[in-house]
């Protein structure tokens, strides 16, 4: 059993290959390399280039094997799930948490998204299977690869705010950290560089809970994201109103306050040396670690966002009241 655990801790399921007749997962050998890139897609590219992963044939396992695999490893349970509305500092927070060698910090793992989408399937059998699978893949990604790991922080994709209820049912006691920012600032950032959340072919309307047929105008990235942001804010209000295990964090609070709030809320003690690393990392761009960070002007005019501002202000009231 010990030998099996040694082997398994250096492998991860990368993605679902097929979900028609049977769920099949492609796996990657990650050797002893760290999960250190700003987004896990970048980490996967690093793993794919390893000699062990350049073979002619893929390493493929079934869903049943995934669940069995999860039962044969030492793992760290999630210390917190980090939700966000995009462009509100969550990537930097994830990067900072990863500076501690005892913490596993996962940023937007593609496989988690694939399995979560299965979990809202209309097929009840698939839904039940996906819920178990999600627990299993989280355990595998949270494997104790060095033996020193004691915290696991999972930063979700922004549209996973729409999966809060499902995740809460799977992890009833795990802290939820929700990061957000004013609508004008978030919209302006997405306008400069559109993310996947702005593309309706990647994140379809049903994920956001958008009803009815969308017009061509609605599917334009800027408009589509505004509609998504409305759903994000409403989801935040809904869960923060009833869930005491939820921490709201506004981008405007600044990195030191945000990190100290996360530490206190998750029962994690940050050493003085680690806090120093956080401050040093905070001076650089979240998505480009070698580039000095310069705050962009977000004062550009955004018309027609009054309803978004009202939702944002409602979230602010809940945050202030909870402190």
Image: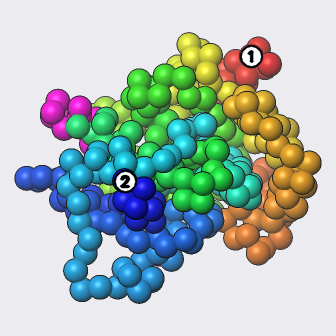
- Mark 2, residues whose alpha carbon is within 10 Å: few (<14), some, or many (≥20)? few
The secondary structure type at the circle numbered 1 is helix
Give the percent coordinates (x, y) of residue 27: 33, 66
Nearer the camera: disc 2 or disc 1: 2
The residue located at (69%, 31%) in the rendering is 266
Q: Are marks 2 and 1 in contact (CB under 8 Å)?
A: no
Front residue of this view, candidates 114 and 220: 114
Looking at the image, can residue 13 be seen? Answer: yes
Query: How far is mark 2 from mark 1, CA to CA?
Result: 47 Å
The residue located at (58%, 64%) in the rendering is 35
Give the percent coordinates (x, y) of residue 223: 48, 48
The residue located at (85%, 58%) in the rendering is 277
Which image quarter holds the C terminus? top right
Q: Eyeballing the image, is 303 above or below 17? A: above
The numbered mark at residue 302 is none
Q: Quadrant of residue 125?
A: top left
The residue located at (23%, 66%) in the rendering is 60
Give the percent coordinates (x, y) of residue 121: 23, 37
User: Magenta residues, as a range?
Assistant: 118-128
User: Does residue 287 belong to the magenta stretch?
Assistant: no
Q: Quadrant of residue 3?
A: bottom left
The secondary structure type at the circle numbered 2 is loop
Report whether 284 appears left or right of 130. right
Q: Eyeballing the image, is 117 above or below 2? A: above
Looking at the image, can residue 193 be seen? Answer: no
Q: Which residue is mark 2?
A: 1
Q: Which residue is mark 1?
A: 322
Labels 2 and 1: the sequence-earlier one: 2
Give the percent coordinates (x, y) of residue 70: 36, 47
Front residue of this view, candidates 60 and 320: 60
């Amino acid at each position: 059993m010990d030998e099996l655990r040694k082997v398994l801790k250096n492998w991860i399921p990368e993605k679902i290959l097929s979900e028609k007749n049977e769920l099949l997962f492609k796996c990657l050998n990650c050797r002893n390399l760290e999960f250190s890139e700003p987004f896990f897609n970048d980490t996967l590219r690093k793993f794919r280039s390893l000699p062990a992963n350049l073979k002619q044939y893929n390493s493929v396992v079934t869903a049943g094997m995934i669940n069995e695999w999860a039962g044969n490893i030492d793992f760290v349970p999630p210390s917190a799930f980090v939700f966000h509305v995009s462009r509100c500092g969550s990537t930097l927070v994830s990067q900072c948490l990863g500076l501690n060698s005892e913490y596993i910090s996962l940023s937007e793992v593609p496989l988690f998204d694939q399995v979560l989408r299965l979990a809202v399937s209309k097929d009840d059998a698939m839904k039940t299977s996906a819920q178990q699978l999600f627990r299993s893949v989280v355990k595998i990604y949270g494997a104790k690869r060095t033996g020193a790991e004691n915290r696991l922080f999972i930063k979700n994709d922004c549209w996973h705010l729409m999966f809060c209820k499902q995740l809460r049912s799977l992890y009833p006691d795990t802290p939820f950290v929700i990061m957000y920012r004013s609508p004008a600032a978030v919209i302006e950032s997405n306008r400069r560089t559109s993310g996947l959340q702005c593309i309706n072919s990647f994140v379809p309307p049903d994920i956001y809970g958008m009803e009815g047929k969308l017009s061509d105008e609605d599917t334009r990235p800027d408009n589509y994201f505004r509609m998504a942001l409305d759903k994000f804010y409403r989801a935040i209000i809904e869960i923060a109103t009833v869930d005491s295990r939820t921490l709201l964090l506004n981008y405007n609070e600044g990195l030191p306050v945000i990190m100290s709030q996360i530490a206190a809320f998750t029962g994690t003690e940050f050493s003085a040396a680690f806090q120093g690393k956080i401050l040093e990392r905070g001076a650089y761009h979240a998505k480009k670690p070698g580039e000095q960070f310069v705050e962009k002007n977000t004062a550009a005019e955004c018309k027609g966002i009054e309803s978004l501002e009202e939702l944002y202000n409602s979230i602010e009231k809940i945050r202030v009241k909870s402190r």
